[in-house]
Amino acid sequence: MKPAERMAIARQQPQELSPAERVKSFAEVVADLDEQTARLEAERCLQCKKPTCREGCPIHNEIPKFIALLREGRMEEAYWAIREQSSLPAVCSRVCPHEFQCEGHCVRAKKGEAVAIGMLERHIVDWMVAKGKDLTTPCALPNGKKVAIVGSGPAGMTVAYHLAHLGYDCTIFESLPVLGGMLSVGIPAYRLPREIVKAEFDALKNCGVRIVNNLRIGQDKTLEQLRAEGFAAVFLSPGAHRSRKLGIEGEDLSGVSHGVDYLREVNLGREIDLGRRVVVVGGGNVAIDVARTALRRGSDQVFILYRRTKAEMPAAKAEIHHLEEEGVKMEFLAAPVKINGENGRVKEIECLRMRLGECDASGRCRPVVIEGSNFMIEADAIIAAISQDVDLEASVGQEVATSRWGTYTVDEETLQTSVPWIFAGGDAVLGPQTAAKAVYQGKLAAESIHRFIEGRDLKEGRMPPGAVS
C-alpha cells in the first residue's frame, strides 16, 4: 500500500462504529500513526526550490524544512521549524482546511494526491506531546509596559505569545467563561480536543500572560478605562460570534436557532434537546459541525440544506466525507423560504428548488430559483448556519472606523485602526476565517504594537502582507 493511501486511511473513521465510537477511533488512529508511515509520506515531498505550499499557507510555514527534518527522524528540530512561524501548531494542524491552503498549492496535487502536510504537522506535534517534550520557549525579562488583548481566540493568543516573548505585560480579556474563543465554543471537541487549547494557554501563562474571564470590554469596562489603567496599546480580536439570520418568515418560532449559538451552548456543557429531525441550513464547516454535533446529542435524522451543489460547498472535503459517512442527508440546490409552525413551535420548513446560473470571476455560480418548485421538510428543529458577524461592542465610546461588512477597518500592513493605540485582527477584521489567517494577523499586529510602543515607524523595512521571503 502506498504511503498516501495509508495516510488517507488514517483520516477515515470505521463505518461500523457509532458516531461517539468513531470519534474515539479517529483520535486513536491519528495518535498512533506510526513513524514509518509518516516518514514514507514525507518522502513524497519534492522539496521544491520555490515551494508553492508555503505560499498557500497563511502563516507561510516552513513546510519543506519541517518535512525534511521529519524524514531524517529529527522530530524536535522539525517541531521548532514549525514554531518559527506558527504560534499554535497543535491547533492549526487539526482545524485548518489544508486542502484549500498548503495542500491545495502542493505541486503533487496537479497530477495526483497532495502531500498530507496537515497530517505530518500534526504527527510532529503529537510526537512532542507523547514524549513529554517542553513546548515553551524562554520569555524575555519584563519591560514594564502593558498591553490589553480583547478576545482569547487564535489572533489574541498569538499577539500575547509574541509580545510576552518581548517582555510585555499582557492581559487577555475574555467575555466567555472558557478560554480560546471560537476554538473552544465554535469547534466541537471531537475535532479540537480541549486539552490542546489548554496546553497552549498554559504556555502563555508560563510567560506571565494574565487572563480575565467573564468580562465584556465595552460593557463591563471600556477601552478608555484600560488606557487609564496604564495599557499602552489594545488589540481587538472579539471574533465573529454573532450568527447571521436567514431573514425569512417563522424564524422566531420555538425550535429555530443559529449555528454558532447552538455550538456555543453545547460546548459550554448545556443540555439541548433538538428532537429527532433536525434541518441545518448552510454548506460551510459550521453547518457540518452543527449537523455532526446534533447526531452526537441524540438526533437521528439530520439534514443539510444547501442552495448550491456538493462541489460548491465551502466546507473541507474531509468534513463532508465524515458527514456522509455518519449518515447525514444532504439536500442540494434547495433554499428555505418560510418556516411553518404549530402552537408557536416549528413544524416544517418550506423550500424552493434551485439551479445554477451564471458564474462569477471566481468560478462560483449563482443559484437561481425554479419557480413553483416548493416542497416541505418536516423538522423538530431548524438551525441556520449561513455565516457570522462580528460584535463591535468592545470599541464603544471610541471612533474606531468600521467597514460596510461590519468589521474593523485597519491598515493592511500594520493592523492599526483609525485610533492609533488600538489595533485589530482575526475575524474582527477578516470576517469568519481560518485559525491560520488569524494567527498570521496576530503576528503582524504584535510587531506593530511593539513598534508603536517604542515610538518606531510601523512600516519601515516590513514586507507587504502575504509576501513570502
Image (cartoon, grey):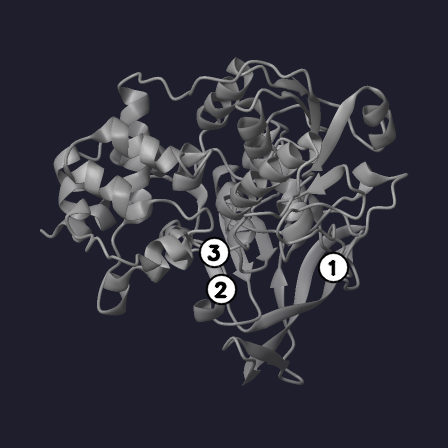
Residue 169 position, x and y percent, is: 65, 19
Is 154 left, or right, of 397 in this rendering? Answer: left
Is 381 left, or right, of 65 in this rendering? Answer: right
* The residue positioned farthest toward the left in the image shown: 1
Residue 339 position, x and y percent, is: 73, 61
Q: Is residue 373 above or below residue 155?
A: below
* Callout 2 crowding tier (Cα within 10 Å): few <14, some 14–19, many ≥20: some
Which numbered disc covers residue 467? 3
* Callout 3 crowding tier (Cα within 10 Å): few <14, some 14–19, many ≥20: few
Mark 3 or mark 1: which comes first in sequence? 1
Q: Amino acid at mark 2?
A: Met
Please give the residue where the numbered disc 1 appears in the rendered image. Answer: 405
Residue at image position (48%, 20%) is: 203
Q: Quadrant of residue 37?
A: top left
Q: Quadrant of residue 264?
A: top right
* Callout 1 crowding tier (Cα within 10 Å): few <14, some 14–19, many ≥20: few
Please give the residue where the numbered disc 2 appears in the rendered image. Answer: 313
Residue at image position (21%, 37%) is: 69
Give the structural element (helix, strand or loop) at label 1.
Answer: loop
Mark 2 or mark 1: which comes first in sequence? 2
Residue 53 position, x and y percent, is: 34, 55
Give yes or no for contact between labels 2 and 1 (Cβ–Cβ under 8 Å): no
Mark 3 or mark 2: which comes first in sequence? 2
Is 351 left, or right, of 392 in this rendering? Answer: left
- The Cα–Cα distance between marks 3 and 2, rounded to whole angstroms, is 28 Å
Give the structural element (helix, strand or loop) at label 2.
Answer: loop
Q: Amino acid at mark 1?
A: Trp
**Looking at this view, is 104 or 331 the one in front?**
104
Residue 27 visible in the shown view: no
Which numbered disc covers residue 329? none
